[in-house]
Image: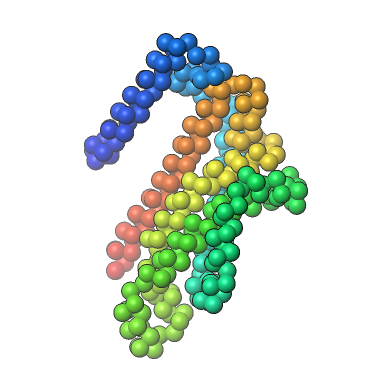
């Protein structure tokens, strides 16, 4: 706790300074609240309107978690198959890179046309956002296994499956967790984008309604919640990584 306070007071002080400048600038310039609300007004709206906003937050969290799990599972399976089948990796990997050059906001309307306004297109959007970082990170971790140990295992008669399970998979865990952290933050963004396609509730729906009614303070509240959720997801993955590393050291 003391370490967190020592390391965290500087960014907290900078954030407090920026909020203070924002508050003073808005009041001195007499900027209308619909154009740029003061931090105090945003905080008041977050507290007073939380009861109405809570259902939207819960919907986005459920959608983010579901899409994150599916996307990371698809990404890990894809990385495993491509690693075990090098020729397939040579054929598929460039296509995976090209798939990330298509903006999700452009692809989203097509998914609605193909699959309707149900849950499926929303899950596909989050899956597309989440699977690529996991795939790339896992492939990089598999390739970075110590070659001398791999050579020794093959000389000792180890099978390809044994080399993968005993050497390449454990060695890829740090890189894999890096991809999971990126995907965890992207999952919230993907959920919000998917909710713009058409949903009954969610942070994306809340933002759309707030912007159409010029409730800029509510838009900032939604942005704040998105940032908090992304940090929480990132922190959960980081905690899982530390626990796994500690557990592996104790097991050794």
Decide if residue 171 is on the left or right side of residue 200.
Answer: left
169 or 248: which is nearer to us? 169
Q: Is residue 25 visible?
A: yes
Determine whether 157 is above or below 65 in the image: below
Report x, y in % for residue 218.
56, 25
- The answer to whether one can see residue 69 in this image is no
At 44% across and 42% down in the image, what residue appears?
Answer: 232
Identified at 53% across, 58% down, the residue is: 132
Q: Is 134 rendered above or below residue 204?
A: below
What is the quadrant of residue 192 in the picture? top right
- Left or right: residue 178 versus residue 102 is left
Residue 60 screen position, x and y as percent:
58, 40
Instruction: Identify whether 48 is placed above or below 64.
Output: above
How many tags in the picture?
A: 0
Q: Quadrant of the C terminus?
A: bottom left
- Picture coordinates of residue 188, whole percent (x, y): 54, 43
Q: Nearer the viewer, residue 73 or 96?
A: 96
Residue 84 is left or right of residue 127, and the answer is left
Residue 244 screen position, x and y as percent: 37, 59
Q: Quadrant of residue 127?
A: bottom right
Residue, x 34% and y 77% (percent of image)?
Answer: 147
Q: What residue is at 41 percent from the left and 71 percent from the top? A: 143
The N terminus, quarter of image: top left
Q: In terms of image quadrants, where is residue 39?
A: top left
Display coloring: rainbow
């Amino acid at each position: 706790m003391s370490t967190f306070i020592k390391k965290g007071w500087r960014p907290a002080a900078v954030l407090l300074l920026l909020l203070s400048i924002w508050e003073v600038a808005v009041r001195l310039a007499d900027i209308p609240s619909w154009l740029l609300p003061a931090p105090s007004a945003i905080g008041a709206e977050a507290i007073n309107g939380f009861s109405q906003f809570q259902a939207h937050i819960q919907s986005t969290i459920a959608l983010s978690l579901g899409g994150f799990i599916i996307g990371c599972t698809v990404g890990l399976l894809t990385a495993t198959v491509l690693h075990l089948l090098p020729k397939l990796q040579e054929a598929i990997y460039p296509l995976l890179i090209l798939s990330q050059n298509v903006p999700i906001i452009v692809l989203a309307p097509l998914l609605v046309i193909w699959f309707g306004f149900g849950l499926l297109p929303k899950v596909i959007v989050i899956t597309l956002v989440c699977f690529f970082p996991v795939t790339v990170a896992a492939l990089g971790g598999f390739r970075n296994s110590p070659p001398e140990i791999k050579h020794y295992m093959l000389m000792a008669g180890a099978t390809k499956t044994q080399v993968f399970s005993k050497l390449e998979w454990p060695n890829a865990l740090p890189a894999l967790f890096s991809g999971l952290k990126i995907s965890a933050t992207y999952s919230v963004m993907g959920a919000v984008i998917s909710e713009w396609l058409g949903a009954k509730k969610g942070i994306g729906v809340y933002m759309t309604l707030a912007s159409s009614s010029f409730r800029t303070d509510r838009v900032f509240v939604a942005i704040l919640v998105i940032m908090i959720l992304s940090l929480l997801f990132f922190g959960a993955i980081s905690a899982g990584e530390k626990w796994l590393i500690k557990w592996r050291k104790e097991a050794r």
